[in-house]
Amino acid sequence: MILGPDPRCQTRDHDRASIPCMTSWPEDFAVRYEEWSAQMTEDIPFYVQLAREADGPLVELAVGNGRVAVPVALATGRTIVGIDTSPAMLEQARASAARSGAQLDLREGDMRDFELEVPAALVYCPFRALLHLPTWADRRRTFERVAASLRPGGRFAWNAFAFDHARAAELDGRRAAEPVPHSVRYAVADNRIDITLKNGATSSLWWATKNEWLGLVDVAGLEVEALYGGFDRRPLDDDSREYLFVARRPGV
Ligand SMILES: C[S@@+](CC[C@H](N)C(=O)[O-])C[C@H]1O[C@@H](n2cnc3c(N)ncnc32)[C@H](O)[C@@H]1O
């Protein structure tokens, strides 16, 4: 089983205390993350543009190695608060920020529980990282934390794949050499994809439908401002393979 209680996780309220805190991102995955993510660059201008439009604090959830946060900080000349559960990923982000001169305020923490001192103008979560949350309740908590952390009119932006069953079935059980050697398992009944590296580290993603995302926006009291089907801001259509959501906290 790939999930296990994560002793680093802090519970914030009685709601969370009854549920074991899980992580789907083993530290061993961090070792190959730079190579894993090297081809993913098209999302950066999208998040940079949103950050430029934001008049206030900027926050990246699941900041990882700073792949997006560093260019966003450099492009805007502002500090990005970066939250992540993985000390190994945060260490890489720290090193990347030091090399580039980007200002990152890195915090070890869980996006299901995060709190900010000052409400944010933009919270964003790139590279499908919300799919690392195993259950709808985990996502609901995260969306509620985001809504509570945004100033009125503040935005929440994220992207996630639109799940393709045919492609998942094709990949199930296969090994691939690129971007780093890995194998894929498709657990249909748990709507889960497991990606296992040669070092045995498994990262899991639980896919979500458009209506699940819309439900999360709704219960958190946010509203959808835009839903794109690509980083060039093309509208979502039936053939899109990526959801790019921009939601906002009402009030301005
Ligand atoms: C695919 S990486 C994304 C990193 C970065 N945002 C990027 O775009 O390259 C996923 C990240 O999510 C983090 N993560 C997974 N579950 C988390 C949680 N519950 N709270 C905060 N970070 C989490 C992992 O530690 C990992 O760094």
Image: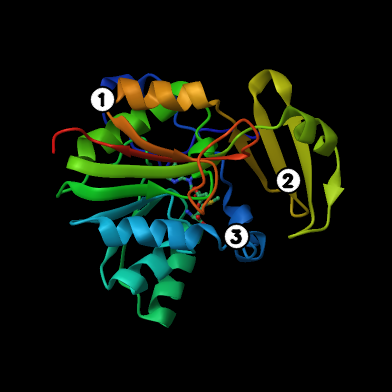
Left or right, residue 137 beside residue 38: left
- Seen at 44% across and 31% down, the residue is 21
Q: In 3D space, how far apart are the residues under numbered discs 2 and 3 (Cα atoms)?
A: 19 Å
Q: Nearer the viewer, residue 16 or 140?
A: 140
Q: Evaluate if marks 1 and 2 touch, with contact meaning CB atoms under 8 Å apart.
A: no
Which x, y percent locates residue 112? 36, 35
Q: Nearer the viewer, residue 232 or 248?
A: 232
- Please tell me which of labels 1 and 3 falls first in the chain: 3
Callout 1: few (<14), some (14-19), or many (20+) C-alpha neighbours within 10 Å?
some
Indicate yes or no: mark 3 CB to ligand 1 under 8 Å: yes
Q: Mark 2: which amino acid?
A: Thr
Q: Mark 3: which amino acid?
A: Met
Left or right, residue 213 beside residue 184: left
Q: Mark 1: which amino acid?
A: Gly
Q: Which dot marks residue 196? A: 2
Q: Is residue 81 visible?
A: no
Q: Which dot marks residue 221? A: 1
- Vertical arrangement, residue 195 with respect to residue 66, above or below: above
- Seen at 82% across and 35% down, the residue is 172
Quickly name the residue at label 3: 40
Which x, y percent locates residue 207? 59, 31
